[in-house]
Amino acid sequence: MFHVGGARSALFNWAIARQQHGTFVLRIEDTDEERNQPEWVQGILQALSAIHINASDPTFEGPYFQSQSKETQREAALRLFAEKKAYYCHCTREELVQRTGSQHLGYDGFCRTRGLDYQEGRALRFRTPDEGVTVVEDVVRGRTEFPNAALEDFVIARGSGAPVFVLANAVDDIREGITHVVRGEEHLSNTPKQLLLWEALGAEPPVWAHLPVIVNEKRQKLSKRRDKVALEDYLAEGYLPDALVNYLMLLGWGPRDNVEIRPYEELEQAFRLEDVIQSSAFFDVKKLAAFNGEYIRALPLEEFVQACQRWLEAPYASWAPEAFDPATFRILAELAQTRISVLGEITNYVDWLYLDQPVYDEASWAKAMKAGAGDILKSTRSRWAEGEWTVEALRAGLEAAAAEYGLKLGKAQAPVRVAVTGRTVGLPLFESVELLGRERTLARIDAASERLSTQG
């Protein structure tokens, strides 16, 4: 699944590429064969397309596959060895622990001066500087210094000769002409190694920018084991792509005029990498839902009706397919559009019309069906059994029932709404009842009254 943090990084990169008339490069770093599946690549492309980063756009390049440039990566490793910027090492982890007496210390440089040639099983290590500092100039985080004495001679090729990720990444970046690396701050610790490799390979390093970590409401880093982090999950619930794009663009950055809800084209033009903050970005699901609600309300009615379609069918809809009526749904949709914040909520707003009987929400029942509820149901039924079946007449009937028992209309509505729709929250009651019809409405009031009587 595509992590929302990866989606945020992709959008920032996309904005920079388009601003500067550059290229957004998608590279699949697939050197770990156990974690590489072709269908996952397609999933990445589909997720990017959902947030309007399309492979057909002239700004888009790729996907490239890291595994396809193994020979170039091997050649770079051998070149570093030939230039004495790297050396072969046969030390095992057990030998290192035995020499240092610690499980936690890094490599001690034992093979640095031994002049070993390649043999199966010998890793190739990069020779880091002994003194001074490696400086990463980061657009977001500023100047960060890493003492070279703390950088161990890190492995750049395994004992099999296969390049490891840190080398493969640098070689591919250089080969593909990468000018900006914009990624999450968890990668900052890898940057001095990559910077040293860029310099050792004779290439000018890119612009580095490490984005703030995204956290949940407890200020914990978003985790797929604990939090909902997959972009696909939000899309499946009914968050609109435009709303997701808008919200993700504001995780760690904001336009200088503080106008947050706006089309992507405006966000792209306003985006400035130097304005990205260093502090953690809170992924506020409530704020995302509020954004989504704004986007839903802005849709033309026909587009809203079309956007709801997947939630009006199995497995979301519990009614029989033949019970659904597009004409009545269009009427309900106009009422629902101003009330829902996520498209997936539409099912619970309309199911009462297409089911034979409403499904009672037990919490709603307990809240509404208290002492006196049976009297309100009885009085309302008697008034609704005769006369016109219009919104105005239905309101007048319930107002009269409320007045009979000294209640305000809002208080009297609750048991009637639960009887008719099964819930305390929903669409305007009188418009709903008018659409349901007299016969079905009275039958539901009778069923609720009977249930109340059996509760004693």
Image: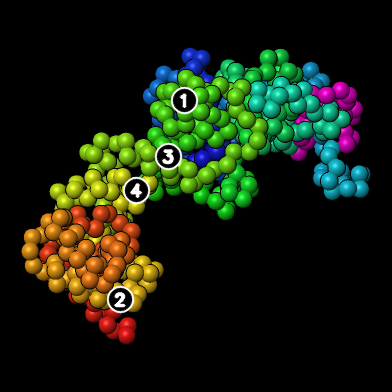
Give whichever of discs 2 and 1 has the lower sequence position.
1
User: Which of disc 4 and disc 3 is earlier in sequence?
Assistant: 3
- Near-viewer residue (411 or 285): 411
Tell me, yes or no, whether the highlighted magenta stretch contains residue 131: yes
Q: Residue at x 7, y 64 (%)?
A: 387
2 vs 3, front mark? 2
Q: Are marks 3 and 4 in contact (CB under 8 Å)?
A: no
Query: Which label was assigned to residue 372?
Result: 2
Q: Which residue is mark 1?
A: 267
- Where 247 falls versus 428 (above or below)? above
Q: Amino acid at mark 3?
A: Phe
Task: Check whether the beta carbons of the residues at disc 2 and disc 1 lie within 8 A of each other.
Answer: no
Secondary structure type for disc 1: helix
| Residue 291: numbered disc | 3
Q: Disc 3 on helix, strand or loop?
A: helix
Q: Within 10 Å of the Cα at label 1, are there few (<14), some (14-19), or many (20+) other Cα atoms?
A: many
Mark closest to the chain's N terminus, 4 or 2: 4
